[in-house]
Amino acid sequence: MRYLTVLVKPSGGGTFHPLGEKLTDDPSINRRAIHYVELLADDTVLLFAEASGSQERYRQIMEESSHVISYLTAGADRWMAVSQFDPTEPVQRALELQRESFLVVDTPIRFTADDSLKITYLGTDEIFRKLYEYVESVEYMAIDVLETGDYEANGSSFSRMITSRQEEILETAVDLGYYNEPRQASLEDISEVVGITPGTVGEHLRKVEERVFNEIIQ
């Protein structure tokens, strides 16, 4: 099993769905992630997503959309929304490909700053080749490959964000209490355990923190 992380975006500056376009263009709503998406037997889409901002405006957009069948929201600052809606032809074809090719999505799907979708797929090289062929055959979407490699079944999307050495240093820092309040360990304490200089320990931890924070705020 392998993983493939890509940026998926509409070609020509368009959008995949008019409903998504309205939600994206509204400055009072911040779309954060998609935690589940499925093409149902009746060819409607079930979506479980995370957002922040104005739930009132979100509900207004959903009520006014002719594509929406049903929806509900829950939560406060970062709230969740479940919706069922009619897909456009491109959305339906993409979800059919996922279902027919056994292409697995490692959720959550993240929205980037430019409203592209950052998706990690799980599958085989053969399945990924079918995905490439599909994208090349359509005009409405494009993908940029960010990362690929062997998938560890007991791993997480977080563990793939950092190197094994960085993960070792982070685990040591947590075990020693570096992130406790008040702090119970120093960079020097960590360096004695992992066998590198305090300055290098600090550099590794800053890189880990940068990658994690960038992932969280997208």
Image (cartoon, helix red, strand yellow):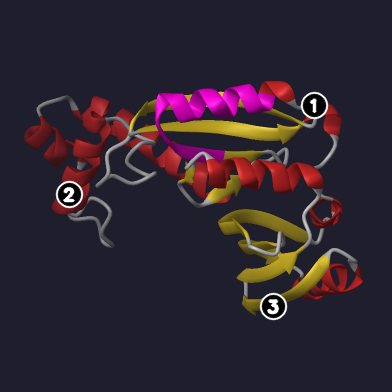
Mark identifier at residue 185: 2
Decide which of tag 1 and tag 2 comes sooner along the chain.
1
Left or right position of 19 against 1: right
Residue 166 at x, y = what percent? 27, 33
> Where does the image place residue 189, in percent across and percent down from the top left?
12, 41
Label 3 and label 2: CA atoms lie apart by 46 Å
Give the camera-side residue of 163 and 193: 163
- Residue drawn at 51 percent across, 39 percent down: 101
Q: Which residue is disc 1 drawn over?
A: 139
Residue 16 in view, yes or no: no
Viewed as shown, does residue 94 lie left or right of 207?
right
* SS assignment at label 1: loop
Q: Secondary structure at mark 3?
A: strand
Q: Is residue 41 above or below residue 134?
A: below
Residue wearing tag 3: 72
Callout 2: helix, strand or loop? loop
User: How busy is the neighbourhood of tag 2: few (under 14 within 10 Å), some, or many (20 plus)?
Assistant: some
Mark toward the viewer: 3 or 2: 3
